[in-house]
Image (cartoon, rainbow, N blue to C red):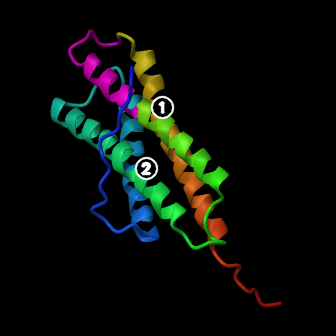
Amino acid sequence: MSRVSPAVTFPFPLTIEALHEDHVIQRWLCDDLERVADLLPTLPTLPELRRISDRILRITSSHFARAERVLGAMPAGQRPTPAMLDALHQMHVQDEMHGQDLVVTLWQHVGTVAGANVGQLSYMLRCFFDGCRRAIRLKESYLAESRPERVRPD
């Protein structure tokens, strides 16, 4: 199956502050997905499932690319190396694929017998939110490394 992401637009400024705000939004999604996993085999209501699915797709189609652009546009000497940016990009590609698969699987579970393939769904939920949290930590480590050393008193 070929995966094609929609064209990415950036309605928000490409700033480190916007990146931090994206991380807050992503953490909320991860927390919500963890709750979904913990409550299995019960699924959220259909409206909530739609909102969760939309959030997954919005984050994977816009937040990830925005983060890469913000980090890649940092001043020389503060910017992550090309290898670091490539590693992040590969994580984002994998997380985007997991997110798309997760949305499909969530909707496939609607109306099925409670408990059917619940292990698979639980695994997919955990893979996605663990992957997102891992990518957030990586980006935050890149930002921490870019800060000038603070002078400490003797």
Residue sitting nearer the eye, 100 or 78: 78
Query: Which residue corresponds to mark 1?
Result: 126
Chain part drawn in magenta = 99-115
**How far, Cα to Cα, is label 1 from label 2?**
19 Å
Q: Position of residue 56 (x, y in %)?
A: 33, 40
Q: Which residue is mark 2?
A: 64
Q: Quadrant of residue 36?
A: top left
Q: Nearer the viewer, mark 1 or mark 2?
A: 2
Q: Residue at x 46, y 69 (%)?
A: 16
Residue 93 relative to residue 57: left or right: right
In this rendering, position of residue 90 left or right of residue 151: left
Query: In terms of secondary structure, where does tag 2 sit?
Result: helix
With respect to residue 36, does 81 lie above or below?
Answer: below
Q: Residue at x 48, y 24 (%)?
A: 123
Residue at x-position 16% and y-position 35%: 47
Q: Amino acid at mark 2?
A: Phe
Does the magenta segment cover residue 104? yes
Principal secondary structure, stretch drawn in magenta:
helix
- As drawn, the label of residue 100 is none
Note whether residue 91 is visible: yes
Is residue 42 visible in the rendered structure shown here? no
